[in-house]
Image (cartoon, rainbow, N blue to C red):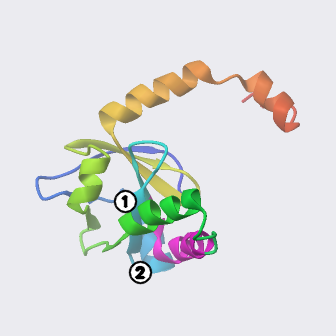
């Protein structure tokens, strides 16, 4: 289970160190085998444990290939999916096309999203986070979803 926001650095070779709090779980759950792909709605990367990605990929492959939206989604998500392995120092090498897509340079952020991590350039994350905070209407969301009191 991935939670929290973690500031990280991408080195000149395109590697980043996985935060220590995730390393043991990644070793235990997937032997450090991960799959990275792009997020189609934001300029960030999605990082899945390999077994979790396999479930996502199966769902994507069940979409009708004659539907142009479904086919486009398959092309970009599966087409960009890159298998990576955490090395002995807990680092991951980011493929260049994925770094370019997410505009990742030195300062980056890993954001836990339960079953996956998102990786953002720090600049993009800060701007998007601030915009989301401004736009959130908790009362409207509670009413629309029927969840009730969402106050924290």
The correct choice, above or below, for 108 with respect to 136 in the image is: below
Which residue is rendered at x = 36% and y = 56% of the image? 19
State the residue at coordinates (77%, 30%).
141
Residue 124 place in picture, x, y as percent: 35, 33
**Can you see residue 22?**
no
Q: Is residue 97 above or below residue 108?
A: below
134 magenta-colored: no
Above or below 4: residue 80: below
Q: CA distance from mark 1 to mark 2?
A: 15 Å
Which of the pair 49/140 is nearer the observer? 140
Residue 41 as seen in the image, left or right of residue 45: right
Q: Position of residue 122 (x, y in %)?
A: 32, 36
Question: Residue 131: x and y, percent?
Answer: 50, 23
Image quarter of the N terminus: bottom right
User: Quadrant location of residue 37?
Assistant: bottom left
Tag 1 residue: 20
**Residue at the location (25% across, 75% down)?**
88
């Amino acid at each position: 289970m991935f939670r929290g926001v973690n500031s990280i650095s991408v080195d000149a070779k395109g590697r980043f160190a996985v935060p220590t709090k995730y390393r043991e779980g990644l070793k235990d759950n997937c032997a450090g085998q991960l799959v990275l792909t792009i997020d189609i709605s934001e300029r960030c990367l999605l990082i899945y444990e390999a077994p979790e990605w396999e479930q996502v990929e199966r769902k994507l492959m069940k979409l009708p290939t004659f539907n142009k939206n479904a086919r486009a989604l398959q092309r970009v998500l599966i087409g960009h999916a890159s298998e990576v392995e955490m090395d002995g120092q807990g680092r991951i090498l980011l493929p260049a096309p994925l770094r370019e897509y997410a505009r990742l340079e030195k300062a980056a952020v890993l954001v836990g999203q339960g079953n996956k991590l998102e990786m953002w350039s720090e600049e993009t994350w800060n701007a998007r986070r601030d915009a989301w905070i401004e736009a959130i209407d908790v009362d409207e969301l509670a009413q629309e979803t029927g969840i009730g009191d969402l106050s924290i």
